[in-house]
Image: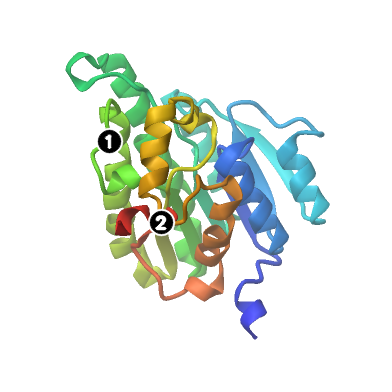
Amino acid sequence: MTAALFDLSGRTAVVTGASRGIGLAMADALASSGADIVAVSSREAAPESAVSRAVRAHGRGFASLACDFADRAAVEELAAALRERHVDILVNNAGTIERQPAAEHDIALWDRVLEVDLSSPFLLAQAVASGMMARGRGKVIFTASLLSFQGGINVPGYTAAKSGIAGLTKALSNEWAPHGVNVNAIAPGYIATDNTAPLRGDAERSRSILERIPAGRWGEASDIGGATVFLASRASDYVNGVTLPVDGGWLGR
C-alpha cells in the first residue's frame, strides 16, 4: 500500500530546466516512479542526452521541448503548447542567478532573473491549471531556494524572485486546492551544481557553509529526487502551499 502512494504510472510530468543538475535529478526520480517525462530546456535534448538516457533507462516515455525562459514570447508559446497536452505534474525548476552587489546591480540582470525565475513559472502554471482543475487532479511543484527564507549576499534579484516563488506557492494553492490541484515548492539547500560553483570554489565561503550544515556535506542533486516524487504523488494529496526545505538541516541551525 505504501509503495502505491508513490506510484506515478500513467502520469505525465513536465520538468523545466531538465538537462542537468537538479532538474535532471527530478526527471530521473519521477521516471523511476513511473512517470513519462516532457523535458524542457534552453535547447531541445538530443536523443543521447543525459536526461533522455535517464528517463528511458526506467522504460518511460520521453519528449523534449526547447524554450528560452528569458524570452516572454517564447514562454507564452511554450505555455500554449502545454495547454494542448495532458499534464499531470508540472515541475517549474528552470532558473538563473546573477551575482552583483545590490548597490551596483545592473537592472537588466534584475529583469532577466525575475523573468526566468518568477514570471515564467507563473505563466506555465497558469497554462496547465485549467486542465488540471477540470480533471480534479494535478500537481504543481516550484523550485524555491533557501533564499525564499533568507536574504543572501550579492543576489538581490534571485532573492526577490525566490521569495516571490514562496508567496506564489501559497497564493496558487489557496485558489487551486479546492479543485484538487496541489501547489507546493521545494527549497534546495546548498547543492553541488553549476549555480553554486563560485561558492564551492571560494575555500573560505565553502568552509563557512559546511560548518553550518548539520549533515556535514554539500547536497547532491539526487537528494532532491525523493521530495519531488513525494510532492508529485498521492502521498502528498493533503499537502498544500508548502515550501519544503531539503537542506541538510541548514535552516534549523
Extreme left residue here?
103
Quadrant that contains the N terminus: bottom right
In front here: 214 or 114? 214
In front here: 98 or 52? 98
SS assignment at label 2 = loop
Q: Is residue 55 visible?
A: yes
The crowding category of the residue bearing disc 2, from other C-alpha atoms within 10 Å (few below 14, some 14 to 19, many at least 20), is some
Q: Position of residue 32 (x, y in %)?
A: 71, 59
Report the side of 47 relative to 203 (left or right).
right
Q: Is residue 215 above or below residue 96?
A: below
Q: Amino acid at mark 1?
A: Gly
Q: Is residue 145 visible?
A: no
Q: Is residue 1 above or below residue 168?
A: below
Q: Name the residue: 34% across, 22% down.
A: 99
In front here: 198 or 2? 198
The crowding category of the residue bearing disc 1, from other C-alpha atoms within 10 Å (few below 14, some 14 to 19, many at least 20), is few
Q: Position of residue 145 (x, y in %)?
A: 37, 45
Q: Name the residue: 30% across, 28% down.
A: 155
Extreme bottom residue here?
1
Badge 2 or badge 1: first in the primary sequence: 1
Q: Name the residue: 32% across, 32% down.
A: 158
Q: Is residue 152 above or below residue 56?
A: above
Q: Which mark is residue 152?
A: 1
In front here: 226 or 172? 226
Which of labels 2 and 1 is toward the front? 2
Q: Position of residue 37 (x, y in %)?
A: 68, 50
Q: Position of residue 196 (x, y in %)?
A: 47, 32
SS assignment at label 1 = loop
Quadrant that contains the C terminus: bottom left
Q: Quadrant of residue 96?
A: top left
Q: Amino acid at mark 2?
A: Pro
Residue, disc 2:
214
